[in-house]
Image: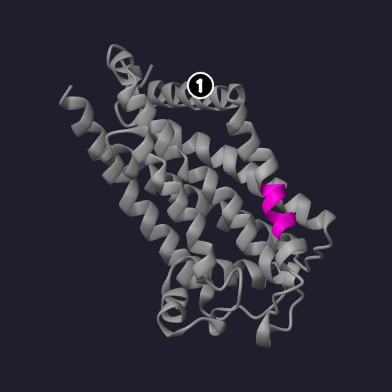
Amino acid sequence: MSASLTAAGDLRRLVVRDLRRDMRILDGLIVNTALPVMIMVLFVYVFGGAITTGSSGLDYIDFVVPAVLLMSGGYGAALTAVTIAEDMTGGMIDRFRTLPISGWVVPTGHVVASVIRNVASSAIALAAALLLGFRPDASLADWVLVLALVTGYVLAMSALAAVWGLLVSSPQAAGAFSFVVLFLPYVSDGIVPAQTMPGVLRDFAYNQPLTPIIETMRSLLLGLPMGSSGAVATAWLAGLVVLCVPVAAVLFRRRTASR
């Protein structure tokens, strides 16, 4: 059997192992099922009546859904840092080192499992939005692009979380990354119009990666003009993945080589 087929089989088994572990952890199940619904209800019913969308003229549910989809998937993706840190500090990596598997397969398994789990989480948030009155005007091609954007965002956040989880020394420190990912949508054009923010925050909102991603999703879902946001969003996501994947592989080799 070729090395590539062996690595693919190892990767599949590690992905299944991570998904099964998530199914056995109650709080993980809550994060991936109840949290997207709770976030959607919170923004639509609690905040929606008090927030206007400015010059966009959109109903608030139409304005906020792209951001909530990314929040739902991104928060779960950020928890990849915790699962990797737990493996690194809990003795699991020592067990993996006794097996004939490639080192890169272990962090990649965490990332792939995170993508599967958290794209599903975003789908739950979308279902909740449809029940709450969200009515998109997207073609089949638009939906495919929305799925690609959500998947790309979850992949980028999972890869970045893997890097963070390999840099820190404990699962508790790794958990801090989830708060950063959850906070970023608030300082973007996703929850409130960026034009309503004070100067420094407004400049940050316009120039951080989430704003073009959200604007692209909003354009696809609602049939709005896209402008350059699609190209900018693609560049941000591709750049993060291309940077973080090899960095995570190098960090994993260094951490395991020192044991």
Looking at the rendering, which quadrant does residue 196 occupy? bottom right
Q: Is residue 250 left or right of residue 128?
A: left
Say what secondary structure mark 1 lies in.
helix
Frontmost residue, 32 versus 116: 32
Indicate whether residue 39 is drawn in magenta: yes
Q: Give me the residue at 74% from left, 69% from top.
A: 48
Q: Is residue 190 left or right of residue 245?
A: right
Residue 135 image point, x, y percent: 82, 65
Frontmost residue, 102 versus 258: 258
- Say what amino acid the circle numbered 1 marks: Arg
Q: Is residue 259 left or right of residue 139?
A: left
Looking at the rendering, which quadrant does residue 100 occupy? top left
Q: Give me the residue at 38% from left, 25% from top.
A: 7
Residue 247 image point, x, y percent: 27, 45
The stretch in magenta equals 36-42
**In the image, residue 239 above or below residue 124:** below
Residue 245 image point, x, y percent: 34, 45
Indicate whether residue 253 is drawn in magenta: no
Q: Give me the residue at 75% from left, 55% from top.
A: 41
Q: Give me the residue at 31% from left, 21% from top.
A: 93
Q: Quadrant of the N terminus?
A: top left
| Tally of numbered discs | 1
Q: What is the chief secondary structure element of the magenta stretch?
A: helix
Residue that badge 1 annotates: 17
Looking at the rendering, which quadrant does residue 199 occupy? bottom left
